[in-house]
Amino acid sequence: MPNPVEVLEALRHAVRDDGVVVIMDEAVADRFAPDGDDLERIMYGYSLLVCLPDSLSTPGSAATGTVMRPAVLDGYARHAGFSGTEVLPIEGFAAFRFTRLVR
């Protein structure tokens, strides 16, 4: 997604004040480590070969790629007008993480 802040801002405006916005994203590690697990390695491969080049083809892109750490999503959410994020305790959903954007 080339413009994540703008998309999150549009979601914030589209959802009622008592509504909920949940983002499903790849469950990569919270921080980069050179000895990442298999999920981390495959997501970096997708990011470098598919998602990042696709995103960079859009002028002005944020160039996030596939590997978006929770802190990056939190920063995007705050720039879009949310007060923060909360990773939801949902287990057993393959390689995905669910994050609620806090108003």
Image (cartoon, rainbow, N blue to C red):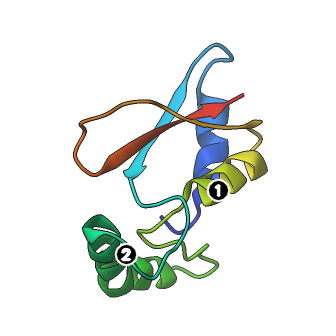
Percent coordinates x, y for residue 83 in the rendering: 77, 36
Horizontal side of residue 77 vs 96, given as left or right? right
The crowding category of the residue bearing disc 2, from other C-alpha atoms within 10 Å (few below 14, some 14 to 19, many at least 20), is many
- Which sits earlier in the primary sequence, circle 1 or circle 2? 2
* In-front residue for pair 76/7: 76
Q: Position of residue 67 (x, y in %)?
A: 45, 68
* For residue 45, above or below residue 99: below
86 lies above or below 35: above
Element on which disc 1 rests:
helix
- Amino acid type, callout 1: Ala
In the foreground, 61 or 44: 44
| Residue beneath the point at 64% across and 13% down | 18
Quadrant assignment, res 43: bottom left
Q: Is residue 50 above or below residue 26?
A: below
Q: Quadrant of residue 15?
A: top right
Structural distance between the alpha carbons of marks 1 and 2: 19 Å
- Mark 1 is surrounded, within 10 Å at the Cα level, by few (under 14), some (14 to 19) or many (20 or more) other residues, namely few
Give the image location of residue 62, x and y in percent: 61, 73
Taking 20 as reference, is 81 left or right?
Answer: right
Q: Is residue 47 left or right of residue 33?
A: left
Residue at which label 1 appears: 71
Q: The C terminus appears in which quarter of the rendering?
A: top right
Whether tag 1 and tag 2 are in contact, CB under 8 A, the answer is: no
Q: Which mark is residue 51?
A: 2
- Residue 69 location, quadrant: bottom right
Residue type indicated by callout 2: Cys
Q: Residue at x 58, y 18 (%)?
A: 19
Which mark is nearer the camera, 1 or 2? 1
Q: Which residue appears at 75% of the width and 47% of the height?
A: 78
Q: What secondary structure is marked by label 2? A: helix
